[in-house]
Image (tube, rainbow, N blue to C red):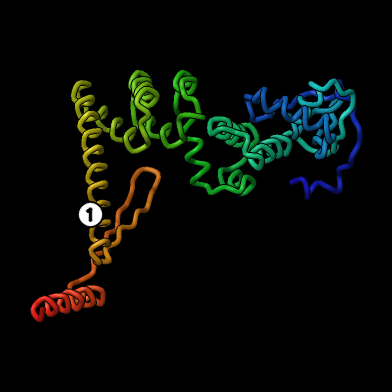
Amino acid sequence: MLGKNSSRSHLLQVPLKDVQTSPYQPRQEIDEIELRELAGSIHEVGLIQPIVVRKVKSGYELVAGERRFRACQLLGLTEIPAILMELDDKNTAALSLIENLQRKNLNYFEEAKAYARLINDFGFTQEEVARKAGKSQSGIANKLRLLKLSPQVQKMISPDVISERHARALLKLNSDEEKMMVLQMIYEQELNVRETEEFVERIRNNLPPEMQKKERKNRKGAIKDAQAFLKTLQKTIIRAKNDGVDMMITEREYDEAVELVIRIPKPGSEVNRHNQEEEDQTNLKRMNS
């Protein structure tokens, strides 16, 4: 979008006091520590990338670069380099969203709300939003589904701890009370996505809470047994290699599981034939001695 409008834009120095923040800014929170670090960097080397503004009646409105703008305010600067662009409300909202998406500064709720605003307030279709944001339409649809969670539930969710897939699992539950209960379990027991989805299914099937706790305990026991089995298997492989058998175990680790592939040579393989020949020679020596 910046490239398409470059013919109607130019660089200038604008007074910080004349710049107002954008009502279309999708990011709701800015980390204060990161902001101070950015201010320190600007103090040392200057502002490398200008902010983007548009002209309004009261001066200028910020389109992109709110962190840079706030960092310059922290430093007490009076002016800031800016690219002045001619943009209507629709393109301003889209550019603000895309600038944040490209910098990966939005959590999934902020992203979903920005998409919803482009669709509801500015008439974008999901296809248009997907194209401008460089996302798939299904990805946009999945983000929008998160907004079906009530504000109370959203407030309980910390995107730094609860992944988007965790949050989507909650959508299968009917009441906020059930969703809050699952969230508490995720925080307390550090449930992964699969465990969360299984817990949600048990609630939907009306499994009593005491049975849910029992199943959770049994699952932990099974995992411990599997880990013990893996250690025993690894020791067996080592002993086999020491005895000349070319056994091999390959582990592939995924987000929620570990896949094991065990390679055992067949009796007629080259390795076993070699070992058998050595054993026959040893026996022959014993017979001749």
Up-down: is 214 above or below 132? above
Q: Residue at x 22, y 45 (%)?
A: 229
Side (left or right) of 153 relative to 107: left
263 and 197: which is toward the camera: 263
- Does residue 86 appear in this view? no
Q: Residue at x 25, y 77 (%)?
A: 270
Residue 77 shown left or right of residue 198 in the figure: right
Q: How many labels sit on residues?
A: 1
* Residue at the image position 50 percent from the left and 35 percent from the top: 144
**Front residue (pair 70, 265):** 265
Indicate the position of residue 278 as horizontal and vertical percent values: 20, 76
Residue 34 against residue 135 in the figure, above or below:
above
Position of residue 262 measured from the top left corner of the image (x, y, whole percent):
27, 59
Q: Quadrant of residue 78?
A: top right
Please name the amino acid that badge 1 sits on.
Thr
Q: Quadrant of residue 216?
A: top left
Q: Is residue 258 placed above or below 20 in the rendered structure?
A: below
Residue beneath disc 1: 236
Residue 178 in view of the camera? yes
